[in-house]
Every structure is written in C-alpha cells, then in structure tokens.
Image (tube, grey):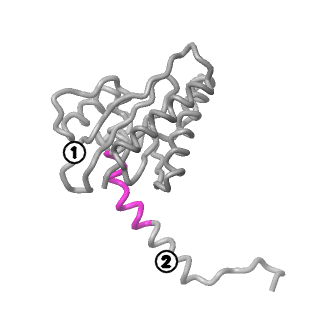
C-alpha cells in the first residue's frame, strides 16, 4: 500500500509518501513541504498548494491519501487556513478517484508513538525509527505527514474490515419502516 500523508497548513503543508503494509516493513518514498508566502492572497496560496499536491500525486502515484482531520483551535484564522488546505488535498485526491482518510492528531500520535498526547519531538523520533531514517524530517510538518501515512497503513486494514462487516450486516437486516407507514 502506498499512502500520501498530508499535514495541511496554509504556510507549510507537509507531504510524505510511505509504502508498506500492516505488520511489514515501511519505506519512505518521499517527504517534503509545500510552502506558500504569507504576503500573497489566500486564494493564490490555495492554488500553490493545489499545484504542489498535484505534483506529489503525479510523481509518487499513491493508492490512498491520508489527511489530518482539522480540529477546533482557539485561533479561528489558523483553523480556517488549515481547513482550506485540507480541502484542497481532499479535492486533489477525489479528482483522481483516490480514497481519502481523515485521521485526528491524537489518533496519529497514538498509532505512531503509543500515546495520543505525544509531542512533536516524540512523533519525529518514532517516524525516524520506523522508517529507518538518519534524522527526523524537518520541519515538523514533514514528519507529521509521514506519521499520517504510517497511521493509515497500520489502521486501514482494520477500518476496511469493519466497513465490510457493517455493509454485510446492513444487507442482511431488513429495512424497518417508521410506524404508521405500513
């Protein structure tokens, strides 16, 4: 499985591609950051992010895209930019028919470090170990993107199995009509 992880941000959008399978060796295919200048219009910045993500999709041909789920922050301006960058990543993937998974920051931290409260240094350290890198990817947005990809690789088989079970259950349980509609 080849996954593009995206740590969305308006100034720095982390991107990282990891290949592997649950219980098997993981390999970093590529890592980087799509940057946009803070002094240009937000719409132009989103176009630059789109171009950057499209370039990563063209170059690395992932089968899945894992994006960090945007959560409420105190700074509304920051969360808006993060949400906009996240939407661009999802749009780029959807345009190509690639499945998109959203993972919360605590879910990613728990998957990679064993603790949903791990700090950025701990995430970077574990990404370095898991992918057998010489040093943690810099900036932290790049390491976070790799952590998202790793999280998805490890969690996707279980999530897919649960979806299959739920779908099978729905197909065997007769639909119930609301009272008074029979």
Crowding at dot 1, Cα within 10 Å, few <14 / some 14-19 / many 20+, comes out as some
Q: Left or right: 55 with respect to 41?
A: left
156 is higher (above) or lower (below) than 74: below
Q: Position of residue 127 (x, y in %)?
A: 26, 36
Report the quarter where the C terminus lies.
bottom right
Labels 1 & 2 near each other (Cβ < 8 A): no
| 153 in the magenta segment | yes
Q: Quadrant of the N terminus?
A: bottom left
Q: Which residue is mark 1?
A: 27
| Disc 2 crowd, CA 10 A, few/some/many (<14, 14-19, 20+) | few
* First to last magenta residue range: 150-162
Tell me residue 142's x, y (percent). Answer: 35, 30
Q: Percent from the top left, x then y, of residue 161? A: 39, 67
Secondary structure found at label 2: helix
Q: Which of the pair 87/103 is nearer the observer? A: 87
Q: Which residue is mark 2?
A: 168
Q: How many numbered marks are there?
A: 2
């Amino acid at each position: 499985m080849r996954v593009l992880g995206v740590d969305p941000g308006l100034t720095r959008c982390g991107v990282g591609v990891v290949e592997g399978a649950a219980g098997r060796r993981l390999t970093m295919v590529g890592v980087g950051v799509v940057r946009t200048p803070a002094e240009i219009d937000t719409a132009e910045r989103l176009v630059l992010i789109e171009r950057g993500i499209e370039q990563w999709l063209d170059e690395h041909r992932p089968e899945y895209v894992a994006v960090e789920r945007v959560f409420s922050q105190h700074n509304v301006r920051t969360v808006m930019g993060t949400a906009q960058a996240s939407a661009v990543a999802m749009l780029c993937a959807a345009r190509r028919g690639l499945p998109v998974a959203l993972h919360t920051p605590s879910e990613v931290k728990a998957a990679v470090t064993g603790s949903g409260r791990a700090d950025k240094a701990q995430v970077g350290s574990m990404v370095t170990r898991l992918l057998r890198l010489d040093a943690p990817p810099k900036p932290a947005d790049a390491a976070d993107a790799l952590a998202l990809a790793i999280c998805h690789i490890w969690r996707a088989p279980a999530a897919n199995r649960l979806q299959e079970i739920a779908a099978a259950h729905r197909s065997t349980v007769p639909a119930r009509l609301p009272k008074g509609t029979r």
